[in-house]
Structure formats: C-alpha cells, structure tokens
Image: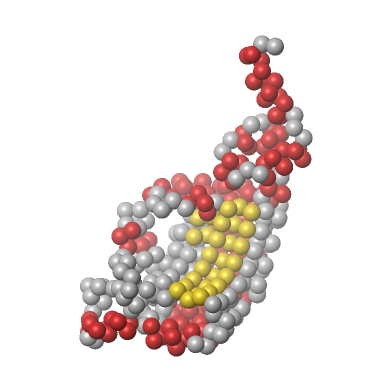
Amino acid sequence: MNAETEPKESESDWCELTRELLINILSRLSVEDRWRGTMMVCKSWFSAFKDPSLHSVFDLDSQFDSPLESTRWWTPQFEAMIDSMLQSVVKWAQSSLTQIRIRHCSDRSLALVAQRCPNIEVLSIRSCPRVTDDSMSKIALSCKKLRELDISYCYEISHESLVLIGRTCPNLKVLKRNFMNWLDPSQHQGIVPNEYLNACPQDGDDEAVAIANSMPDLKHLEIRFSKLSAKGLNSISQGCPNLEFLDLSGCANLTSRDIANASCSLVHLKEIKKPNFYIPRSVFHTERYGHWSLYDERFQTDIFRI
C-alpha cells in the first residue's frame, strides 16, 4: 500500500465510527479538546458533538483560572464569542443543561438560557458587565430548580434580582455575590475598565436585607468586599439561620465585635472568613474611627494584604 494513501484511509476509518462510539469518545474529552478540533473532523463527528448527552454541563471556568486576567476578556468581541458558545450549547442540549459555569456573557445568551433551560441547577456567571436585572428576572421566573448561583463581579445586577431569585427558587443553597477589591484596585487596573471598577455597588445593606428576607435556606454565602454594615450582617444572621459557610473577606465596614455578635446566632456555622487585613490611614479618615489604636479592634491586623 502506498504510504501517501494511508492518511486518507485512516481518516475514512475515523469517519465511519458509529455515533454511539463517537459520543463515548467525545464524552471522555475535556471541554477544550471538544471545542478545539474534534467537532471539525467531519460531519459525523460534528453531529455527534451536538448530542444533548454531551451538553448537560457547560463549564469554562478552568479556561479563566490564569492568575493574570486578560484585557481581551473585557472586550465586546470576547463577550460575543462567549454568548455564541453558550447559545449553541443551549440549543444542542435540548433542555438537558443543568450546570453553566462561564464568565463574560451577556443578557443576550442568558435570555435564551431562561427560555430553554428549565432544569438549570447551577448558574455561575462571574465578571459579566452586561448581565442585568432584565435577564436575571427571566432566569428567576423560568429556572426554579436553581440550587447554586454565582453572580460575583456582576455590577449591573441589583438587590431586586436577589429578592426575585430568592422568592422563586426555593432550592437555592449557595449564593456567591463577591465584589472586586475596592480597597486596593491596583490588581485590576489596566485590565478591567476603570468605569466598571468605579461602578461597584454601594448598597451593601440593601443586598444583605434582600438575601435575608428571601433566602432563608442558604447554607453557603460569599460576599467578599461587600460594603454592608453591622445592620446588614445582623439581617443575614437572623434571616439565614442555616448558614454553614460565610465569607466576609474584605468587608471593611465590619468590626470584629460586629461579626462576633452576628455569628453567635448562626448555630450551624462551620466556617467563617473574616475581613482579615490591615487598612492604612489613607483609606479611611481617622476621625471616623477615633484613635489609631481602635484599628486593633476594628480589623484583624495579623495579615497585611494591602
């Protein structure tokens, strides 16, 4: 046999694999490997790639795990690509999609999720500057099986969405509503648009009250760098008595006494992350807190992160 003909024969063999076998092979590949090449082998491979059984979970989080953010992620072009991928998966999944973990999508793709994915249980959409209350209200009304929601760094989502989601999704057990480090934004500057960094929501207590009043069965809550006060934290401790994990990292408006008073009523609490850092005088006016020695009471000063 001529060596030049062998690749063609080999390619033909791969194309003649049964659909069941192709699906079995594709199911063993990572999301990255599936999207980068296998779907382009031939028509039969692309057909198998679109099988609903391969799209019950859409997880791109590992693709964003680099310690350094990319400025490209915050561009409209990148957002359009993520939207296109999610819209395709939603169509292929045929309502079998149960988990979505992506970043930098927009209302465009989430509207389709709300329309076609009633069985979604996990929705993680961190760092989405163009996800708003509009799409979240649709998600809340259509995806009532939600048990885990991550809307960290999504600044166009307000406390109104939190209320609606809490009231319509009774299975919700995990909420992640973290914010970027507004105390030291240098790690984001030059990557995240400045206007977005400056748009960090100021209504920490409103969000805390929304969580407390509508999500009584929460077990896991993350609100890193929230601007809530002792009042908001007390609302959470009273309204979410089943909390087992609470992350308050970076919540600079809370004192150690505030946290101790609020957490004493959380009898199921197994782990709490406190705002464990030192804040220089340049960030806050000293007259607000009195003498400098009060910082030992207001903040835990054993770790210096700023």
Task: Please indicate whether residue 52 sits to the left or right of residue 177 in the image.
Answer: right
The way the protein has been coloured in the rendering is: secondary structure
Q: Quadrant of the C terminus?
A: bottom left
Q: Nearer the viewer, residue 276 or 22?
A: 276
**Hey, which quadrant is residue 258 in on the image?**
bottom left
Q: Nearer the viewer, residue 33 or 274?
A: 274
Instruction: Answer above or below: position of 90 versus 25.
Output: below
User: Do we see residue 162 in this rendering?
Assistant: no
User: Do we see residue 146 in this rendering?
Assistant: yes
Task: Please indicate whether residue 16 sits to the left or right of residue 195 in the image.
Answer: right
Residue 252 lies, in percent from the top left, at 35, 76
Measuring 47% from the left and 86% from the top, which residue is drawn there? 262
Q: Quadrant of the N terminus?
A: top right
Instruction: Answer above or below: position of 218 versus 14.
Output: below
Measuring 37% from the left and 56% from the top, which residue is drawn there? 192
Measuring 72% from the left and 42% from the top, which residue is drawn there? 24
Measuring 58% from the left and 53% from the top, which residue is drawn there? 59
